[in-house]
C-alpha cells in the first residue's frame, strides 16, 4: 500500500533546494517513501481538530525502484549511517573541547596578571 499521509506517524518535509523527505516516524515503513506495510501496526489516524495544514506533499512521490531486496538495501544504508553517528559526535565534541581550551588560553594571555 502507498504511504498513508493520513497517519499521524507519516511526515513529509520540503527543503529549500527542492528536496522532499517522506518518512514514517516510528520506522515501520521499510520501503518508505514508496510503501507502508499492509496492515501496519503503527497506523494511527491524525487528529486534525482545530489544526491548519499545508499541502501534505511538495511533489510527486518518486518512482519506486524495480528489483528485489529494496527494503533490505535501505535498512543496510540506515545501519551504516547509524553506525557512523557516535564517531561523528565524538569528533565534534573533541573539536569543541579543543576550541574551548584555545579560547581559555587566549583569554588568559590578554589579561595576564603580572
Image: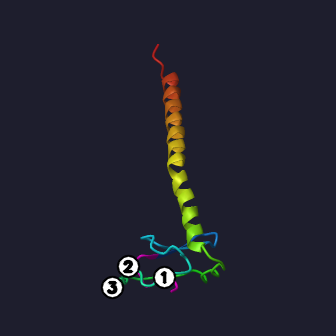
User: What residue span does the magenta drawing correspond to?
Assistant: 1-10
**Does residue 74 appear to the left or right of 27 in the view shown?**
right
Q: Which residue is pictured at 45% across the width and 73% down the height? A: 28
Compared to residue 47, the image places residue 98 above or below, namely above
Q: Does label 2 or label 3 sit earlier along the sequence?
A: 2
Q: Which residue is mark 3?
A: 49
Asked whether residue 9 is drawn in magenta, I would say yes
Q: Label for residue 41?
A: 2
Q: Which residue is mark 1?
A: 54
Q: Label 2, label 3: how many angstroms apart (C-alpha)?
A: 23 Å
Where residue 68 appears, as percent x and y from the top left, is: 62, 76
Q: Which residue is pictured at 48% across the width and 29% down the height? A: 104
Where residue 96 appears, as percent x and y from the top left, is: 51, 40
What secondary structure do most residues of the magenta stretch adopt? loop
**Does residue 37 appear to the left or right of 73 in the view shown?**
left
Q: Does label 2 or label 1 sit earlier along the sequence?
A: 2
Q: Secondary structure at mark 1?
A: loop
2 vs 3, front mark? 2
Amino acid at each position: 500500500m502507498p504511504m498513508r499521509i493520513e497517519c499521524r506517524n507519516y511526515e513529509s518535509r520540503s527543503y529549500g533546494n527542492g528536496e522532499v523527505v517522506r518518512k514514517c516516524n516510528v520506522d515501520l515503513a521499510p520501503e518508505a517513501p514508496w510503501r507502508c506495510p499492509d496492515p501496519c501496526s503503527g497506523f494511527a489516524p491524525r487528529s486534525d481538530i482545530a489544526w491548519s495544514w499545508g499541502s501534505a506533499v511538495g511533489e510527486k512521490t518518486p518512482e519506486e525502484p524495480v528489483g528485489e531486496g529494496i527494503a533490505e538495501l535501505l535498512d543496510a544504508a540506515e545501519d551504516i549511517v547509524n553506525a557512523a553517528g557516535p564517531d561523528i559526535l565524538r569528533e565534534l565534541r573533541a573539536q569543541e573541547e579543543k576550541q574551548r581550551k584555545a579560547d581559555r588560553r587566549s583569554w588568559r594571555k590578554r589579561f595576564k596578571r603580572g
